[in-house]
Image (cartoon, helix red, strand yellow):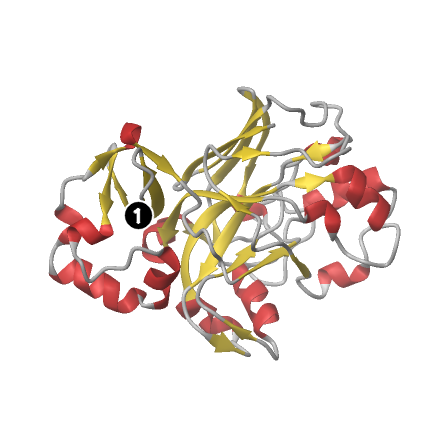
């Protein structure tokens, strides 16, 4: 299923799922289903049972897409962790910033926390931070957790996944460059906007794209990861004002979501509705070529991120 949160022309907010060119509203389908995506995720086993037993997936849409506005599918994630799982992105960005990748990159999947209260959805306008001169986008896949757990073994992490969505980790590079001269990860440069959408694709539906990697089948890997499998063969692309800026594939990730979830859950309890970003796919941001392919983002620019099997996340910079 492709789950969404949306607003009607009257301003009421609903949860539902995409179907053809429309949306089925959960509470119009069955009053027992919640009208909040976090509540749905918290109780998703019961909710999916209601949907299946009552054959609700066969319902006709209650709204056409032209009559609603899609919001972030999960407007209130409990937390957002963002990783650095693509080696190509790390090599490119490090070169621009004038440093090399630390050896720890190849030993542990590293993440930072970002602002889970600064969440935006499809078609939302993204305000350029005051005095920022090098605003950037970042093309990522994100996993949404569906079950509570701590110290989760790597081979059991799949049981804790609810679904997947597109993540635009908007970045103020001028701020980032200054603060990262200190031995500290991203902070204020990542504080202003995180966009998700247009939907959350449930784990069972996204599994059709799963693949196993090896040096023979995927020579594009710069350094062969320590594990195979747990990746998805999905195309990822980014456009600015209709111009293609990046074309990549999630299967090039060095670190897997299983490894990311295990790392995050060490000595910590993960909760349903926690979001883990993959990090930026190689060439999936303007910093990687030091803004030579496209100037920094300016008000009026329309940024579209697309991932196969999920859709398009589109936002305008203001």
Circle count: 1
Looking at the image, which residue is at 68% across and 41% down? 171
Q: Which residue is depicted at the point 12% across and 62% down?
A: 53
Judging by the rendered image, the residue that carries numbered circle 1 is 14
Question: In the drawing, does residue 158 fall left or right of residue 280?
Answer: left
Dot 1 falls on a residue whose secondary structure is strand
The answer, for residue 112, to whether it is visible in the render is: yes
Q: Considering the image in quadrants, where does the C terminus appear? A: top right
**Is 118 rendered above or below residue 275?**
above
Q: Is residue 249 left or right of residue 22?
A: right
Looking at the picture, how far across and down is residue 223, in whole percent? 69, 52
Which residue occupies the extreme front position in the image?
10
Quadrant in which residue 156 is drawn:
bottom left
Of residues 217 and 259, the one nearer the viewer is 259
Q: Position of residue 65 (x, y in %)?
A: 29, 32
Residue at horizontal 46 percent and vertical 42 percent from the top: 234
What x and y, as percent, mark residue 239?
55, 26
- Residue at left offset 48%, top offset 76%: 149
Give neighbour class at mark 1: few <14, some 14-19, many 20+ (Cα, 10 Å).
Answer: many
In x, y percent, where is residue 132?
Answer: 76, 34
Q: Can residue 217 be seen in the rendering of this structure? A: no
Instruction: Please tell me which residue lies in front, 76 or 151.
Output: 76
Q: Residue furthest left?
A: 54
User: Between 204 and 76, which is closer to the camera in this rendering?
Assistant: 76
Q: Is residue 186 above or below residue 20?
A: below
Query: Foreground residue, 142 or 38?
Result: 38
């Amino acid at each position: 299923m492709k789950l969404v949160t949306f607003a009607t022309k009257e301003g009421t907010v609903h949860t539902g799922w995409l179907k053809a060119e429309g949306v089925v509203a959960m509470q119009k389908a069955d009053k027992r289903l919640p009208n909040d995506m976090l509540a749905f995720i918290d109780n998703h086993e019961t909710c999916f049972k209601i949907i299946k037993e009552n054959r609700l997936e066969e319902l006709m849409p209650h709204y056409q897409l032209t009559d609603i506005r899609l919001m972030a599918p999960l407007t209130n994630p409990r937390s957002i962790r963002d990783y650095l799982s693509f080696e190509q992105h790390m090599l490119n960005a490090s070169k621009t910033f004038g440093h090399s990748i630390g050896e720890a990159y190849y030993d542990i999947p590293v993440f930072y926390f970002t602002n889970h209260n600064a969440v935006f959805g499809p078609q939302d306008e993204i305000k350029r931070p005051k005095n920022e001169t090098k605003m950037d986008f970042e093309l990522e896949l994100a996993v949404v957790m569906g079950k509570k757990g701590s110290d989760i073994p790597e081979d059991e992490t799949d049981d804790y996944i609810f679904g997947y969505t597109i993540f635009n980790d908007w970045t103020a590079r001028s701020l980032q460059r200054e603060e990262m001269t200190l031995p500290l990860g991203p902070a204020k440069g990542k504080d202003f906007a995180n966009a998700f959408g247009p939907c959350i694709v449930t784990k069972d539906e996204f599994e059709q794209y799963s693949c196993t990697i090896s040096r023979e089948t995927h020579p594009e890997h710069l350094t062969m990861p320590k594990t195979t499998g747990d990746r998805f063969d999905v195309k990822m692309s980014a456009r600015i004002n209709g111009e293609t800026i990046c074309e990549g594939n999630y299967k090039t990730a060095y670190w897997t979501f299983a490894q990311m979830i295990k790392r995050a859950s060490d000595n910590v309890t993960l909760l349903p509705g926690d979001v883990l970003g993959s990090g930026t796919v190689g060439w999936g941001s303007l910093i990687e070529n030091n803004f030579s392919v496209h100037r920094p983002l300016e008000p009026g620019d329309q940024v579209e991120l697309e991932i196969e099997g999920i859709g398009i996340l589109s936002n305008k910079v203001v």
